[in-house]
Image (cartoon, rainbow, N blue to C red):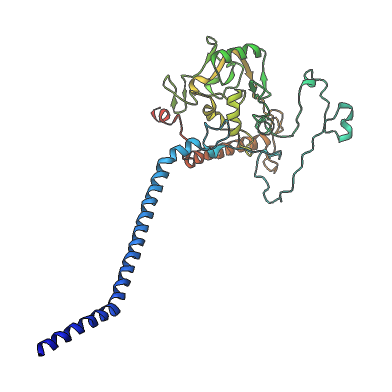
Amino acid sequence: MKKRMSTSTSLKAEPKRQRLFTHRFLPMILLLSAAFFVGSAFIITDYKERILGWGSVMVLQYARPKMCETQCRAYGTEALPRGIISETSDLEMRPLWGLQNKKKPKLPMNLLAIAVGIKQKESVNKIVKKWKDLEWNDHAIHVSAANQTKWWFAKRFLHPDIVSEYSYIFLWDEDLEVDHFNAKRYLSIIKKEGLEISQPALDPEKSELHHPITARDEKSTVHRRTYKVIGRTRCNENSTGPPCTGFVEMMAPVFSQASWRCAWHIIQSDLVYGWGLDFQLGYCAQGDRTQKIGIVDAEYVVHNALPTLGGSAANKVPSSSSSSEPDGRSEVKKQSFIELEIFKNRWKRAVKQDNCWVDPYEQSTKKQ
């Protein structure tokens, strides 16, 4: 009888224990399960994000060259590092030497263009001078800006889109004698030779030579390199760049339409003398600069090297040591060297910063 009672008691107690377990421990188990699933979800999400992050990095790494290929560049500038490209210009005059006054507030600029006949020149305060004595007057566009260089004019008035109708651009100094130069024969030669950038050779007996490669070779129609020793550089048949080959002087360059579209972008709007440009023109040669750039010997000129900017040195009266007036010619020369260093530094910086630009001559230069 006692055994039955104890059994019955234990049977009754069992459901009670189950209810106690259900009420006390089941909620705890459910909470733990929920925490496990939530934690798993966060871990999985974080893992997925990391996987996606790695994937993004890998995509960016592998896509970088493709991005460089599709990077938008202005037509004609593909051969240049991005930082050296000077895309815009202005009609503001630049001083021949010294720093420009940056403290002066920049006022809104307006452009006044006047078409005035000779008889009306007095009415515009003598803006136009009499040009009638020049036989080519009726076929020329006259632009006058005192104390500005040809590179200042070229950057502002010879934009590639403006001169796109011309096959070749002659950008010459004014102190050249052309008694032995025939333009038609010259054009025929450079077309036949496939020269994108060229210049007429200089008569070595009568000209002031700054670069040996520009001297005329009487036995040649065209030459593309020199074999002289220039400073520390020994030029030979293995030379691949300036001053041994792929070079013309900035005094009398002739550009094809395609090469000018590129070269115009290298001209810096704020550097008026153009020093340093000649050593980088090979990048605009539309191919191998050792073949696409040359000196035409058959049609040559005489370079008189007459100083004009800053006043004529030959006619200038020597100033006394006590005079505070700067010597124009010496200041022009000083500024030219300053601009050369500025341009060289800009080129180096542009090459360093443009990760998408590849120098086609880098390896050959190192070998040289």
Rendering quarter of residue 189: top right
Residue visible at 68% across and 47% down in the picture? 101
Which image quadrant: the C terminus? top left
Q: Answer with left or right where residue 25 lies relative to residue 219.
A: left
Residue 241, given in percent of the width and then of the height, sits at 47, 26
Residue 297 appears anywhere in the view: no
**Residue 77, image quadrant:** top right
State the residue in front, 265 or 100.
Answer: 265
163, 282: nearer the viewer: 163
Residue 329: image x %, image y %?
A: 66, 34
Tell which residue pokes out farthest to the front in this image: 1
Name above or below for residue 281 compared with residue 134.
below
| Residue 28 on image: x %, y % | 30, 75
Residue situated in front as seen by the camera: 285 or 22 = 22
Name the residue at 82% across, 20% down. 133
From the image, which quarter does the N terminus lie in? bottom left
| Count of numbered labels shown in the rendering | 0
Indicate left or right for 141 with 351 as reference: right
7 sits to left or right of 249: left
Asked if residue 246 lies left or right of residue 134, the reply is left
- Residue 3 or residue 307, whichever sits in front: 3
Image-quadrant location for residue 186: top right
* Residue furthest out toward the bottom: 2
Tell me where residue 124 appears, x and y as whole percent: 86, 35
Does residue 29 appear in the picture of this structure?
yes
